[in-house]
Structures are given as structure tokens and as C-alpha cells.
Image: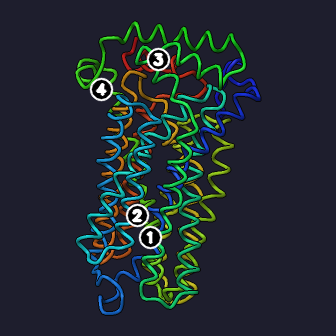
């Protein structure tokens, strides 16, 4: 991968004041990402126990209802991200996250106490509203608080918290499965998700509103007061305020969907954002995050052994994300995505070959796991952090909430389609499913190479001008 040159002003080390305060803001906000990660990861351990008969403490899930229960959260997340985008533009990023913490609690309690499949599906949908809302709001909130030199790495901490939440879920799943003889152990797995939801709500009580959102509402004095908390240089504060005032004057009458429909370059940008959601989800990453124990059980591994092996997914994802955060400050978004997609194609094809042609046994189980871990290494290092970073910086300020919410909502719909169709596809087509994923990812690679502008090394206001020029051909 080649590096992208950035101006000295952008690459200069951030001041200590900005570093400390914005890090605290990012830590508080990413409790939503931690909850997001735990809630998406925990289902992989809960499903085998929920699939046991009702008389034995489960819900009697079948392959079809497994897909419905898993995808209910994801469909809820699509609605949640769409609604949260509109709400965050109207009421602010901080207020929206505070409300989402309450929705997290309702969804967690509902899933942990669900007496039937119908109630479980409904409560997973409610939980998805919170997960999706957090997924579209947290990156925008952090991106608007951070300066240009810290935006990439701070927003990428969102992905680190997602995979950390998934790792915690995998570890607790394995521990609870090993230590507990209760047929209701899956309820304990699901109930633990309340912790990050509570931490999100508490954290939001102690952070300020986004200065860029305040400025978009004409609350310039409040915006300056927040910038004074998170910037040490008066010169930087004055520059950011001047940029925000200028954009407000230009964009005063350009709000809502009428502005999107009336502005060709913004429509094109939205389609690119939606396309990136397809790229991220049709790698098949969440097929592994949700169903790795089931994949490994199909090779002859036992339930507890499969749950323990799945911890490797979380460990690799966390390590890969650390590397990704380091790389994202040095390399452009496009080359990282393209390199990652190349390795994803190779890993998917290798996994399909292993499952199709190797005889059942431990060798097949561990070779399949190795392919999955290789896939996750490059996915979480080169694709996922870049996706969430792009969601925080692609869209113009006056429409950032609604456009990010729309793009992320579509990403969740793609996620839901993978979650719903994967167990059915595996039952019908077996290992050929992974060859289909590989072919789709070749198309994704072509899309990124031909359609995605490079966004590295620019302020949010400067990026807006650059993207308008790039997409209009001016």
C-alpha cells in the first residue's frame, strides 16, 4: 500500500488538551459500540442453547427461526440507524445517545426474559433499534469532536470497541457454557449486555454536545465554548469557527431530503455510502461472527469446543483492529479497502475448498478455523475500521446525521440479509456458499477502485469542498 501525503498542519501532533478531553469523549461514546459488539457477538453462543427443546430450557429454534432471531436485531438496527440519523440532526448527537441507552436496557431485559420465539424476535428488534442508532451516531459524534489529525484514529476506536464487545461475548459464552449446568444459561449470556448500555447513559451525562451540531443550529457561542474545552490553540478555534460559519451561510436553506434530491453530487455521495455498506457486509463477516460455532460443528467439533474455538475470532479481530488503527493514520482509505478485499476473496475461496474437499475430523475443523481467522484478520484490519471512518467523514455537515443514518441503515439491511440467508444457504448449498461470497467480493473490489474518492488528510469542512469538486467534475 502506498501512503498519502498530507499537509504539515494536518499531520502535526495533537495538543495534550485536545488529546485528553476528546479521548474521554470518545471513550464515553464508544460504550455504545461496546454494547453493539456484545449484542452482535453473544448470539453465536446463545443460539445452540436456544435451539434445544422448550422442555429442556431452550426455545426450540429451527434453522429458519435461528435466522429470524439473529436477523431481527439487524433489521431493527436498520430502522434504528435511520431514525437516529434524523433525531441526531434535530436534537443533537449527545441527546440521541442518551436516549439510546434507555432503549438498550429495554431490549436487553426483554431478550433475557423472553418466554417464546415471538417475544424473542420482538425484543431483538427493539435491541436492534439501539444498536443501529449507536452505530450511526457514535462515529459522527466522535468525528465532529476530533481535530483532523486525530479523527481517523479516534473514530477507529469505535471499531475497536465493537470487536472488543464481541470478544467479551465469546469469552463469557464459553465460560458460562463450561461452568453452568443451567438450561437457561443463554439468558445469562444475553442479560450481561445491560452493562455497556448503562455505561453509555452515564458517560453521556458528562460530555458536551458536538460543536458542529451546535453551529448548524446557529448556536455559535455554545459551539465556541465547546471548542475551547477541546482545543488549546485560539488560532485553531477561530479557523474552525470561521469554516462552520461560512458553511452555515452557504447551506442555510439546504436541509432535509429536498436538498439531497436537488443536489446531484450529494445523491452520488449517498449512493457511494450505501455501496460501501454492501461492500462491508457482503464480505460475509457477520456470517462468521454469528455462525462460527455452527460452521465448526458441521466439521465434527462439539458445542463447547466450538464455542471455545470461537474466542479466536474475537482475539484476532481485536489484534487486527489495533493494527488497523495504526495503519489508518499512515495510509489512504482506498488502498486499505482494496488490499483487504483481495485477501478476503482468497480466504473465502480457501474456506470453501476446505469444507468441500477435506474429510471430516480435527484437521478439517482447525483448517477451517484457520481460514476464518485469516479472513477476520484482514477484514478487521483493513476494511471495517475504514468503513466506519468513512461514515463519519463522507457527508456534508448540514445533512450528516440523516445521510449517515440512511447509509448505515442500508448497511444493516445488508447485514440482515446475510444473517437471514446464511443458515438457509448453508443447509441448501453447503460449502458452495463461500465461493459465492468470494465472487461478490471481486465485484466489491471493482466498485471501490472505480467509485470511492480518497478522503485522507482533510478537515471535515475542507473535505466537503473537495468531495463536491470530485463528484461534480469541476
- In this rendering, would 59 be left or right of 381? left
In the image, residue 228 sits, relative to residue 194, either above or below, namely above
- In this rendering, would 277 be left or right of 206? left
| Displayed quadrant of residue 175 | bottom right
Residue 260 placed where, x, y %? 28, 23
In the image, residue 19 sits, relative to residue 342, either above or below, namely above
Tell which circle, 1 or 3, labels the residue nearer the N-terminal end. Answer: 1
Estimate the spatial distance between the alpha carbons at disc 1 and disc 2, rounded to whole Å: 7 Å
Estimate the spatial distance between the alpha carbons at disc 1 and disc 4, rounded to whole Å: 39 Å
Depth order, front residue of 226/427: 226
Of tags 1 and 4, the one toward the viewer is 1
In the image, residue 212 sits, relative to residue 167, either above or below, namely above
Q: Secondary structure at mark 4?
A: helix
What mark, if any, has residue 215 been given in the picture? 3
Residue drawn at x 50%, y 48% is: 201
Return the residue at label 4. 267
Residue drawn at x 39%, y 33% is: 88
What mark, if any, has residue 108 been given in the picture? 2
Return the residue at label 1. 190
Tell which circle, 3 or 4, labels the residue nearer the N-terminal end. Answer: 3
Do residues under tags 2 and 4 come within 8 Å of each other at their CB atoms?
no
Amino acid at each position: 500500500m502506498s501512503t498519502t501525503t498530507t499537509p504539515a498542519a494536518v499531520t502535526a501532533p495533537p495538543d495534550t488538551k485536545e488529546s485528553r478531553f476528546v479521548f474521554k469523549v470518545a471513550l464515553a461514546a464508544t460504550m455504545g459500540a461496546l454494547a453493539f459488539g456484545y449484542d452482535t457477538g453473544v448470539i453465536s453462543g446463545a443460539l445452540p442453547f436456544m435451539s434445544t427443546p422448550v422442555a429442556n430450557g431452550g426455545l426450540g429454534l429451527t434453522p429458519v427461526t435461528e435466522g429470524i432471531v439473529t436477523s431481527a436485531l439487524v433489521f431493527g438496527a436498520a430502522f434504528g440507524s435511520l431514525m437516529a440519523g434524523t433525531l441526531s440532526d434535530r436534537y443533537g448527537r449527545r441527546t440521541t445517545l442518551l436516549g439510546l441507552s434507555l432503549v438498550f436496557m429495554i431490549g436487553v431485559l426483554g431478550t433475557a426474559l423472553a418466554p417464546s420465539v415471538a417475544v424473542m424476535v420482538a425484543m431483538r428488534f427493539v435491541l436492534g433499534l439501539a444498536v443501529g442508532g449507536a452505530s450511526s451516531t457514535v462515529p459522527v459524534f466522535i468525528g465532529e469532536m476530533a481535530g483532523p489529525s486525530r479523527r481517523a484514529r479516534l473514530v477507529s476506536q469505535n471499531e475497536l470497541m465493537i470487536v472488543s464487545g464481541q470478544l467479551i461475548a465469546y469469552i463469557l459464552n464459553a465460560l458460562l457454557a463450561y461452568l453452568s449446568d443451567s438450561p437457561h444459561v443463554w439468558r445469562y449470556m444475553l442479560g450481561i449486555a445491560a452493562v455497556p448500555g448503562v455505561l453509555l447513559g452515564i458517560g453521556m451525562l458528562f460530555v458536551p454536545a458536538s460543536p458542529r451540531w451546535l453551529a448548524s443550529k446557529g448556536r455559535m457561542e455554545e459551539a465556541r465554548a465547546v471548542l475551547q474545552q477541546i482545543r488549546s490553540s485560539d488560532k485553531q478555534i477561530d479557523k474552525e469557527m470561521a469554516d462552520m460559519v461560512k458553511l452555515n451561510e452557504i447551506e442555510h436553506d439546504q436541509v432535509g431530503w429536498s436538498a439531497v434530491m436537488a443536489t446531484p453530487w450529494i445523491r452520488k455521495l449517498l449512493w457511494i455510502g450505501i455501496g460501501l455498506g454492501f461492500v462491508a457486509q457482503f464480505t460475509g463477516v457477520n456470517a462468521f461472527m454469528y455462525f462460527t460455532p455452527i460452521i465448526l460443528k458441521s466439521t465434527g467439533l462439539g458445542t463447547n469446543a466450538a464455542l471455545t474455538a470461537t474466542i479466536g475470532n474475537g482475539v484476532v479481530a481485536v489484534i487486527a483492529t489495533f493494527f488497523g488503527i495504526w495503519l489508518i493514520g499512515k495510509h489512504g482509505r482506498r488502498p486499505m479497502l482494496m488490499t483487504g478485499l483481495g485477501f478476503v476473496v482468497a480466504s473465502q475461496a480457501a474456506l470453501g475448498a476446505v469444507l468441500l474437499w477435506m474429510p471430516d475430523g480435527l484437521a478439517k475443523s482447525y483448517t477451517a478455523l484457520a481460514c476464518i481467522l485469516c479472513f477476520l484478520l484482514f477484514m478487521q484490519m483493513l476494511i471495517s475500521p475504514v468503513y466506519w471512518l468513512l461514515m463519519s467523514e463522507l457527508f456534508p455537515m448540514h445533512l450528516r446525521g440523516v445521510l449517515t443514518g440512511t447509509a448505515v441503515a442500508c448497511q444493516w439491511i445488508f447485514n440482515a440479509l446475510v444473517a437471514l440467508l446464511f443458515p438457509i444457504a448453508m443447509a441448501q448449498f453447503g460449502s458452495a456458499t463461500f465461493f459465492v461470497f468470494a465472487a461478490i467480493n471481486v465485484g466489491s473490489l471493482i466498485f471501490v477502485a472505480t467509485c470511492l474518492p480518497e478522503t485522507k488528510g482533510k478537515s471535515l469542512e475542507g473535505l466537503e469542498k473537495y468531495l463536491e469538486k470530485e463528484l461534480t467534475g469541476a
